[in-house]
Image: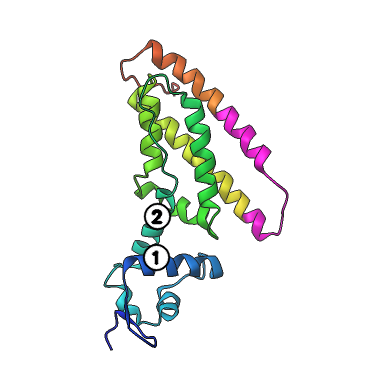
């Protein structure tokens, strides 16, 4: 029997990227990122490991794909006019991203490792929203990076607390930090609206 067919009774089902991804997320939820392996995944799908390499060159390639899939679920609609409230878009997107990262076991760890290699829809939408509201491209890029890193870092800490069976809610703490972040971004917005010349605002060394 061909390696890329799942061995089962009845009509064989082709092994494709969607089936691999679904099984990989299930395996990640059960075993965690540290124990995740292509050998375990192949066993779960009842195929030889070589069948997986027809779709992904390596374990890293598969985990990168899972990261892209996880981040794609946090897509938001881009504001179309200058009247859009960028503060609300940042807050909404930060909450969506946090929720998606915590949907899967070790989701924050996975995203922390691979998100720099991903051009995610939510980052693109946030960048465009800030740029439409007067941010320079440089400042918009740094603001998006700061928000994303805050969410990933906070979700990472939450995942560790979950492993330690700490069940207290961290929603208020997350909201508090997000508000501080947005207030800081407001101060940058007031500068860039007065100086739309694509200057990069960095502290002097």
Neighbourhood count class around disc 1 (C-alpha, 10 Å): few under 14, some 14–19, many 20 upward = some
Q: Are marks 2 and 1 in contact (CB under 8 Å)?
A: yes
Q: Which mark is residue 30?
A: none
| x then y, percent, for residue 37 | 44, 72
Q: How is the image coloured?
A: rainbow
Say which element carries label 1: helix
Say which element carries label 2: helix
| x then y, percent, for residue 8 | 39, 86
| x then y, percent, for residue 178 | 58, 33
Residue visible at 54% across and 40% down in the picture:
95
Residue 13 part of the magenta-drawn span = no
- Where is the N terminus found, in terms of image quarters? bottom left
| x then y, percent, for residue 63 | 40, 61
Residue visible at 31% across and 70% down in the picture:
16
Q: Which mark is residue 69?
A: 2
Residue 139 visible in the shown view: no
Q: Which mark is residue 21?
A: 1
Q: CA distance from mark 2 to mark 1?
A: 9 Å
Residue visible at 57% across and 50% down in the picture:
156
Q: Magenta segment, which residues? A: 160-181
């Amino acid at each position: 029997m061909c390696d890329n067919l799942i061995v089962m009774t009845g009509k064989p089902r082709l092994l494709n990227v969607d089936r691999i991804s679904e099984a990989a997320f299930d395996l990640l939820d059960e075993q965690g990122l540290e124990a995740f392996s292509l050998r375990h995944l192949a066993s779960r799908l009842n195929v030889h490991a070589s069948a997986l390499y027809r779709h992904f060159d390596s374990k890293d390639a598969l985990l990168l794909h899972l990261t892209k899939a996880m981040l794609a679920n946090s897509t938001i609609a881009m504001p179309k006019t200058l009247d859009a409230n960028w503060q609300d878009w940042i807050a909404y997107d930060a909450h969506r991203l946090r929720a998606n990262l915590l949907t899967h076991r070790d989701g924050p760890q996975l995203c922390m490792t691979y998100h720099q290699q991903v051009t995610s829809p939510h980052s693109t939408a946030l960048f465009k929203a800030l740029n439409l509201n007067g941010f320079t491209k440089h400042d918009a890029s740094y603001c998006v990076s700061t928000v994303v890193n805050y969410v990933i870092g906070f979700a990472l800490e939450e995942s560790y607390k979950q492993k330690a069976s700490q069940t207290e809610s961290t929603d208020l703490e997350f909201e508090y930090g997000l508000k501080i972040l947005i207030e800081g971004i407001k101060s940058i917005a007031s500068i860039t609206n007065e100086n739309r010349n694509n200057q990069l605002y960095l502290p002097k060394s």
